[in-house]
Image (tube, grey):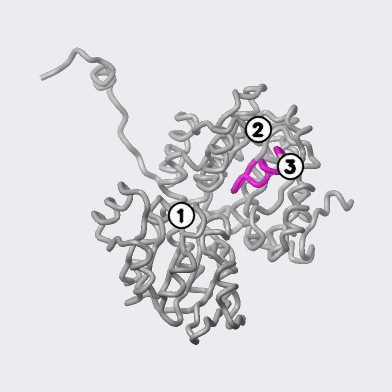
């Protein structure tokens, strides 16, 4: 196998284990399987080159196989230095001949060099988790822009970045915000992030959740999911927010809501899911209890001010895998999990396959949508076409054996008319 196809992975000998886990995940991804069956027959992506900067997990591998069977030429790289599953990366390269550049724990230099390697394919379509691939194209590989039909973005953080680029008139091709699809954020963000975040923190710490004071920073769909699952485990949950409507919703959902300064003093476990920067900052560290746990489930490791924590600490040591203990001047210890990176993938396996089934079904169908157009949309960030969102919902219900009603012609006429009243 050539160097180009071999890509950059930790250990090719892990491939057999990766195949087994990819196949196991596929059992819980029936919607993607239905799409794969159709793509295999129709080849809607024939001649399309795709570069994907995604979390290299078993679920992502199944998306890759759908796109490949649809006729696409692929290359993948990691979207986070700690989220790669090395056996999956090895399998993609060795067993499925998909060039993949991803190593769990890679340093920043390797991470960005892998993104550049993935772009050597000169993509027609980009797939992104966090918009680092898009940013690299706009900053360093602008010569690629002429061939690009469009891209997709699957994270809240990435959509925020891309909308910022669009507002400043710097986004030079169209992106479909897969994260905005109802069949994505209502399920992946809420149920997926909720369960996998609790799983990651539990694996890293082996703590009992029951009776703990848990502070959830941010009450978007991810925050809702974390708060719901923590409460389900018996924790006392406090929410911090800057958005008054979300804060009000958290109150009415039965959670305590208060400023982070106050929450800092009562929390045993802190989880950031804001999509922003320094949700937990220096002033909060000084108020925390001895032994407090700090975890992030947002895409980038900026939600906890790690630099300030490093500067404050007089000692730092690793006390468990994925747990770094920082000792402050008066002896107080704070424990940072997974280097402040998304804990559900750093210390666990990420979202369950059954919820990623819908997210990646949206990805696959949006890629097909971009490819079939044959020409780019106008520059900007676009929602997932409604018909794609609804198709994913219908396919998921079908796979679960759930039937629903449809409108009668009379009902359709009533809903489309203004004339009927009391």
**Of the residues tagged 3 and 1, which is closer to the observer?**
1
Is 52 within the magenta?
Answer: no
Q: Which residue is at the far top? A: 419
**Circle 1: is it few (<14), some (14-19), or many (20+) Cα within 10 Å?**
many
**Circle 2: is it few (<14), some (14-19), or many (20+) Cα within 10 Å?**
few
Is 135 within the magenta?
Answer: yes
- Chain-order first, disc 2 or disc 3: 2
Which span of residues is magenta-colored?
127-138
Q: Residue 274 carries which label?
A: 1
Image spot of residue 275 (x, y percent): 49, 52
- Chain-order first, disc 3 or disc 1: 3
> Residue sitting at 23 percent across and 19 percent down?
414
Q: Name the quarter where the C terminus is drawn.
A: top left
**Circle 3: is it few (<14), some (14-19), or many (20+) Cα within 10 Å?**
many
Image spot of residue 215 (x, y percent): 38, 66
Mark 3 element type: strand
The residue beneath circle 3 is 74
Image spot of residue 291 (x, y percent): 46, 81
> Residue sitting at 70 percent across and 41 percent down?
68
Mark 2 element type: helix
Mark 1 element type: loop
Which one is in front, 322 or 359?
Answer: 322
- Chain-order first, disc 2 or disc 1: 2
**Of the residues tagged 2 and 3, which is closer to the observer?**
3
Mark 2 → mark 1, Cα distance in angstroms: 42 Å
In the rendered structure, the answer to whether residue 305 lies left or right of residue 120 reads left
């Amino acid at each position: 196998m050539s160097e180009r196809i071999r890509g950059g992975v930790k250990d090719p000998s892990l491939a057999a284990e990766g195949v087994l886990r990819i196949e196991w995940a596929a059992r819980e991804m029936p919607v993607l399987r239905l799409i794969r069956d159709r793509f295999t027959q129709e080849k809607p992506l024939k001649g399309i080159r795709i570069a994907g900067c995604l979390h290299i997990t078993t679920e992502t591998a199944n998306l890759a196989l759908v796109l490949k069977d649809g006729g696409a030429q692929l290359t993948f790289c990691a979207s986070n230095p700690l989220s790669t599953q090395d056996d999956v990366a090895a399998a993609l390269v060795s067993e499925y001949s998909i060039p993949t550049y991803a190593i769990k724990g890679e340093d920043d230099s390797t991470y960005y060099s892998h993104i550049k390697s993935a772009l050597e394919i000169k993509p027609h379509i980009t797939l992104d988790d966090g918009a680092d691939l898009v940013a690299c194209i706009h900053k360093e590989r602008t010569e690629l822009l002429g061939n690009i039909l469009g891209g997709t973005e699957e994270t809240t953080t990435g959509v925020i970045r891309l909308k910022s680029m669009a507002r400043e008139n710097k986004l030079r091709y169209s992106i479909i915000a897969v994260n905005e699809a109802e069949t994505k954020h209502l399920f992946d963000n809420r149920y997926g992030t909720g369960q996998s975040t609790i799983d990651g923190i539990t694996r890293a710490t082996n703590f009992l959740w029951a009776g703990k004071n848990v502070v959830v920073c941010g009450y978007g769909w991810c925050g809702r999911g974390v708060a719901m699952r923590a409460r389900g485990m018996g924790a006392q949950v406090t929410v911090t927010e800057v958005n008054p409507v979300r804060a009000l919703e958290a109150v009415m959902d039965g959670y305590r809501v208060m400023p982070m300064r106050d929450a800092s003093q009562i929390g045993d476990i802190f989880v950031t899911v804001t999509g922003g920067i320094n949700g937990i900052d220096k002033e909060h560290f000084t108020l925390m209890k001895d032994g407090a746990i700090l975890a992030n489930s947002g895409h980038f490791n900026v939600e906890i001010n790690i630099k300030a924590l490093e500067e404050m600490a007089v000692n730092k040591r690793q006390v468990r895998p994925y747990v770094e203990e920082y000792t402050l001047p008066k002896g107080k210890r704070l424990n940072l999990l997974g280097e402040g990176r998304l804990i559900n993938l750093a210390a666990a396996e990420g979202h369950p396959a059954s919820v990623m089934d819908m997210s990646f079904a949206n990805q696959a169908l949006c890629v097909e949508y971009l490819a079939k157009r044959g020409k780019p949309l106008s520059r900007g960030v676009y929602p997932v076409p409604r018909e794609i969102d609804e198709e994913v919902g219908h396919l998921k219900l079908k796979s679960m054996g759930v039937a629903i009603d449809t409108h009668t012609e009379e009902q359709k006429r009533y809903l489309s008319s203004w004339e009927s009243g009391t």
